[in-house]
Image: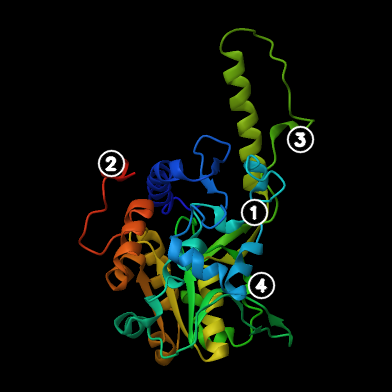
Amino acid sequence: MSGASFPFVGQLRAELILRNRIHARNHPHVESYGSNPVVVYAPEETRHGNFYPLAYDAICARPGWIRRFDKIHSQLRSLPKSQNNPARKWRELDSSMSSDALLMNIFCTPGVSDSAPLLRMMGIDSADEPVFGWKARVPLANGRVDRTEIDMRWGGLLVEAKLTESDFQCREASVVESYCNFDAIFHRNLLPRVPIRIQRRRQAVEFAEEFTQEWEEPGEDSAEIARAFHAEIEDRVDAEQLWSPGYASYQLIRNVLAAYATGSSFCLVYDQRRPDLSQAWFDVMRSVKSADLRTRCKALTWQEIVPFLPHGLRQFLDLKYGIVAPGTDASPLEEFETRR
């Protein structure tokens, strides 16, 4: 996680943790292990605590949408087993921090896809239903394709959803530059660059020739002296290691490549409480050579979408996520307590 993104991510996660602890009181759930436990919801007979009821009904009625629940949670070891169904593995969409769940809460709710103002704002001209987890085929320079997963495809629009993710990931330059048409699409010197760690940071104990736990002068300060000595070993070795050149915002770069390859438009949807993601977006967009492609790429906040949504869904987003229309204050937690 970059230093620039940390305060925004931390503040948003803290708010979502508090809101979901209250919301979860009426739903089966667990909290992850650790100092900042995240609420993860277990499915019930006809509802799911992480989903707006009408959206969940629509998801369950469509095989293509319910298949998104096949994706296993990436942090299973940090989660206790569900008391209702210990044999069931947790899914990514069970997490209160899931941006995919937020995306489906909005766009699977009946009536949302019929909102003409929303369709115009997003640039959607298709009567087809949204497709979640769509696999793009982005060509590589070696003749193969990268089956990039797109969070949502709706007609000719590709959508990337973000909530509490720390950033858009980093990848080695050799990987990013291996895409076909990379130099035709981007000014590579304008793209955000980062060094990529080749080796993990090693602990002092791994350097037997220097590591020691014995100190000639015992006393209260000996433990602190030992920690400082070991940290110095780790810092020196880490500074001496080789770093690989890389690119920041790899997901955005890859999505722009996917839009170019498929002749689609692209939209990033993020939370307005994450100005760090907005800055990352502009850092990538300024490097796109084609004016036509730039006009087919846009960024919207969840908050900008809210005015076009049904009243019940708006209440759900307000209480569970603190997401409300621009210029509006989210319901305070005290009011949330009263409504429960």
User: How far separated are the C-alphas under marks 3 and 4?
Assistant: 31 Å
Which residue is under mark 1?
74
Question: Residue at horizontal 57%, vertical 41%?
Answer: 32
Q: Residue flagged by tag 4: what amino acid is it?
A: Val
Looking at the image, is mark 2 or mark 3 nearer the viewer? Answer: 2
Q: Residue flagged by tag 1: what amino acid is it?
A: Ser
Sequence-wise first label, 1 or 2: 1
Which residue is under mark 3?
206
Q: Is residue 230 left or right of residue 267?
A: right
Sequence-wise first label, 2 or 3: 3
Q: Pointer 4: residues within 10 angstroms few (<14), some, or many (20+)?
A: few
Q: Nearer the viewer, residue 234 or 158?
A: 158
Q: Residue flagged by tag 3: what amino acid is it?
A: Glu
Sequence-wise first label, 3 or 1: 1
- Percent x, y of residue 70: 66, 63
Say what secondary structure mark 2 lies in: helix
